[in-house]
Each structure stands twice: as structure tokens, then as C-alpha cells.
Amino acid sequence: MSDLFDRGVALGRMPLAAQLRPATLDDVIGQPGAVARGSILRRRIAGGALGSVILYGPPGVGKTSIARAVGNMLGKNFRPLHATRSGVADIRKLADEARMVPLLIFVDEVQRFSATQADDLLAICEEGTADFIGATTGNPYHVLTPALVSRSTILKLEPLTLEEMEQVVRRGVDHLRGEGIEVSLTGAQVRRIAGRSGGDARRALTTLESLAVGHDAKRVTITDAMVDEAYAAAPVNHDRSGDAHYDVVSAFVKSMRGSDPDATLYWLARLIHGGEDPRYIARRIMIHASEDVGLADNAALQTAVAAMQAVEKIGYPEAQIVLAHAALHVARAPKSGSACRGIAAAMQFVANNPPAAVPLHLRDAHYKGAASLGHVGYRFPHDDPRGWVEQVYSPIPKGTLYQSDARDAGTFEKRADEYWQRVTGEMQARKGGQ
């Protein structure tokens, strides 16, 4: 029954993305770092000693295609395995086959391999019995066993650029023309399909195929409405637990810190479009309202907290406006890292030094007998017209932990520095001794 099913699949029409798999690395669109002439992959192929290679990157960037092209260039039989469906017995069968014919073993979702499976595979590679390429969407240093990582060449693949995606779409149009299907697309529509596919070549070709096939006429004119329909229910290429998630979040918070409002909105939109929980985004904004704005504009934290409360009540789509409001406040506000830097220095100081004794005049004096213990001498600042008195509050020299980030802008921190300099006659310590 399995043979009959396989034969039925073979007799059907192969998907466009599979038809366009590159035969060699010269046919690969994008990934110049991995496939360019002189790259480590090219040198390994030229030397006839591929060994163990891990390709990692988001879906649709060419991991399987590159692996197949490498197999063609090496002149080796391509043997795919899937980590969730192949066991140790399958690997050992391939090892027996590899002793008779040259093989390139390809494992998709290699992060799902058990340690035993990985050990058996590594033994085959280290003996030189077969070459191996593994593919994963996760960061290999996080999701693979240390043994597999240490014995493999790690190559990171990036999402295709818009221009590269346009090349993919045009290649698909040319291929369909060769099959007798004339697809009429404007340049704007090619760019639209390329852009909405999120750097995923397979997704772009699948969309193109769905637009082009099944019509009575051999000439198909694509409309904007057809493109919108094709993407209406398309999944968003955003893995909320993988590298893509953390990279986009990192870009979002660094754009707020870097005071770039356009970049802030772009990365925020990417998170929203990817279905990110608005409460998660609001929490990130709250953190950076203190970490990056801090004492430069205390209202930024108030805005961020209000945004968190608001998104819990209203949700998408209106929550995106609230998130944009709070994120732009953080992005546009003057910056100070003194609160973040100060508490980090204080925590490190406490962890690395013996606990300092509380000065006697600062100890609790609200009980009978406190004076007899020497808990006296505290001077109440509000009794002084200035609201401040000179007294020791800790054995730590001033400026050791808190260093102002006051800059030229009229921020709270700068106003505070100027006020206390007038009152105390002392300048507040600045970062770097400014």
C-alpha cells in the first residue's frame, strides 16, 4: 500500500518550489556568505571532504535546496532523514549503504534528534563513511547537543532580501511560462508578493503557484485582489519562541534606546503582525522606560505602566495605538542609564563585600531603650530650611554607585543635579568623571 501511495504522489504535479530547487550552488538565490565562491562550503566541496555541516535559519531560506545542491556537486546520493520519523536503526541502515555507495545524509529538524541518534550519526561522519548536513530553524548553540555542535561547521542562513525575493518570483514566472502557463504580473505585484512572503522563498513560490494554476485559460492576469486573497489566511512567518522572536524584540528595544522613532514603529509592527501578546510588548516598554530613560523623564515609566493597564483592558487592534504611544515616548525621551547602572553597581558591591554596619544615628530609634544602645544623633532634614543636612548615610563614598547621566537637555536629572549643587555646594558625580 505504501508503494502504491508513493507512486500516486510521483504521478502528481510536483510543487513549483520543488521544481525550482537549484541543481548547484551557482543556482542558489541569496545566501552569499554560505554559497559564494571561496566560501568554506565551496572549499569543502572542492576538496571532496564535506564532513558535518549544520545549516540554520528561518523556514524557506534554502536549507534543503543547498543540501541537495551540495549532494549534486559532490556526486553523492542524497538521503534525507527526518528527526521525528527516523530512528537509530534507520541511521545504521544508511551507514551500511554508505559503505557501498557514496552518500550525503540530510537531516531536517536535526534539533529533534536524541543524543543517541546524534552520536550514531557523528560516528558515521567521523569514520568518513558518509557526509552529513543538518538543518534547523533554532540557534544550534542553544538547541543541539554540544557534541554535534563541536564536530560541525555551522553556517547561518538569512531571510532573503526583497530584491532576492523578486528574483525568486520572476524565476517562478519563467518556469511556469515554460510549462505553458503565461502569468501576467506587474512589477508592483512582483514586489508585493516578494515583500509579503517575509523572506521565505518557498512561501512566495507557493503563493505564485496558487495564483497561476487551475485557470481555464493559459494566460493568467493576476490582480491585486487575487494577491490579497492569497495572503489573507497565510501564516505569519514569526516564531514566538525562536531566534526570530528574540532578534526582533532585540531590534525593537535597541531602536527605542537609540531614539529612532521610525525603527521603533517598524519593529513594533513586526511584533504585532506576528501575533505577539500585547502584554509582553508592554512589559518590554516598561522595562526600558526605566532602563534607558529613567531619571531623564520620569513620565516615561508612567506612560508605560498606563499602557500595560490599557492593553489588558482593550486588546488588539486598538492596543497597537497604545503600544505605539508608549514606545514612542521611550524612543523620543532624553536618555539616562543611571538607574540601571546604579542598581547593577550596588548589587555587585553588596555581593562582593562584607555587609556594612548601619551607622548608629540611622538605626531604628522607635522603641524604649534605643538611646541607651547609642541610636541617637539623627538630624531631621525637614528641620533645616534647605530640606537637607550634612550627615553620613553609608560608608560608601559618594559617586561610587550613582553617577548622573544629566546632559544638555532640561531633564529631571539635570535639574536635580543643578538644584543639589546649589544646596550642598557639591557637584554630582557623572559617568566617566564628567
Image (cartoon, rainbow, N blue to C red):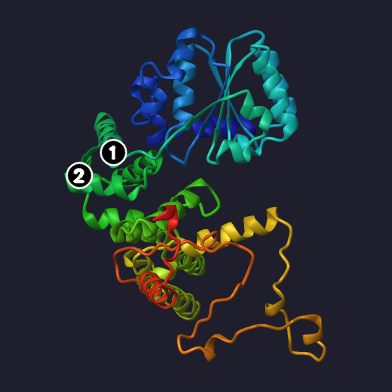
Residue placed at 63% from the left, 33% from the top? 2
User: Residue 40, percent across and down?
Assistant: 46, 18
Q: Quadrant of the C terminus?
A: bottom left
Q: Residues within 10 Å of mark 1 (few under 14, many from 20)?
A: many
Q: Residue 65 carries which label?
A: none
Q: Quadrant of residue 31?
A: top left
Counting from the top left corner in percent of width and height, residue 125 is at 64, 17
Answer above or below: position of 223 versus 329.
above
Position of residue 226 measured from the top left corner of the image (x, y, whole percent): 27, 55
The mark nearer the N terminus, 2 or 1, is 1
Q: At 59% across and 24% down in the image, what residue appears?
A: 152
Residue 320 or residue 247, whichever sits in front: 247
Task: Write down the residue under mark 2.
Answer: 185
Check the image and report above or below for 181 versus 189.
above
Q: Residue at x 55, y 52 (%)?
A: 241
Q: In this view, does 145 lie to the left or right of 21?
A: right
Residue type at mark 1? Val
Number of the label disc, if any, that sits on residue 169: 1
Circle 2 packing at 10 Å, graded few (<14), some (14-19), many (20+), is some
Instruction: Say whether residue 43 is left or right of residue 390.
Output: left
